[in-house]
Amino acid sequence: MDDTLMSLQIIPKLPNGEDVTSYVDEAIRIIQDSGVKYRVGALETTVQADMNTCLILIQRINDRMVELEVPSIMSQVKFFHVPEGITIETLTGKYDEL
């Protein structure tokens, strides 16, 4: 059961102020490939899944950044956990019509 919403923003620290877009795109690809429901926002991506899946995704994304030789990665993560279940639309559905 999807009981957790997780919003994730990764901020790779690259030498010489390089553009991080390709690394963020790679993180989103990992989320896409996981099969979970997600929504990309301007500053973060929100995932709808169970808590364990969310935690595994964070680990996979960080492992991939290490494989890509990113010197350091800051991850800002927020969780909204509802044992009875939760969806992205519960919080944002009223804005989807706009």
Image: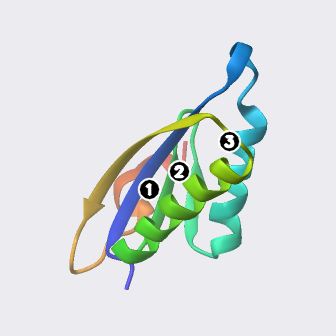
Res 23 quadrant in image: top right
Q: Secondary structure at mark 1?
A: helix
Amino acid type, residue under disc 1 in the picture: Gly
Q: Secondary structure at mark 3?
A: helix
Res 75 quadrant in image: top left
Q: Nearer the viewer, residue 77 or 49?
A: 77
Asked if the residue at tag 1 contacts the one at tag 2, i.e. Cβ–Cβ closer than 8 Å, the answer is yes
- Residue occupied by mark 2: 96
Q: Is residue 36 above or below residue 89?
A: below
- Residue occupied by mark 1: 93
Q: CA distance from mark 2 to mark 1?
A: 5 Å
Asked if the residue at tag 3 contacts the one at tag 1, i.e. Cβ–Cβ closer than 8 Å, the answer is no
| Front position among marks 1 and 3 | 3
Q: Which mark is residue 29?
A: none
Where residue 92 appears, as percent x and y from the top left, is 42, 51
Q: Is residue 28 above or below residue 59?
A: above
Q: CA distance from mark 3 to mark 2?
A: 24 Å
Residue 50 visible somewhere in the drawing = no
Q: Nearer the viewer, residue 31 or 14?
A: 14
Tell me the quarter of the image containing the C terminus. top right
Q: Is residue 4 above or below residue 95?
A: below
Q: What's the residue at 43%, 50% (across, down)? A: 7
Where residue 6 appears, as percent x and y from the top left, is 40, 57
Where residue 93 appears, as percent x and y from the top left, is 44, 56
Q: Earlier in the sequence, mark 3 or mark 2?
A: 3
Res 18 quadrant in image: top right
Amino acid type, residue under disc 2 in the picture: Asp
Where residue 9 appears, as percent x and y from the top left, is 50, 41
Q: What's the residue at 22%, 81% (across, down)? A: 84
Q: Is residue 52 left or right of residue 25?
A: left
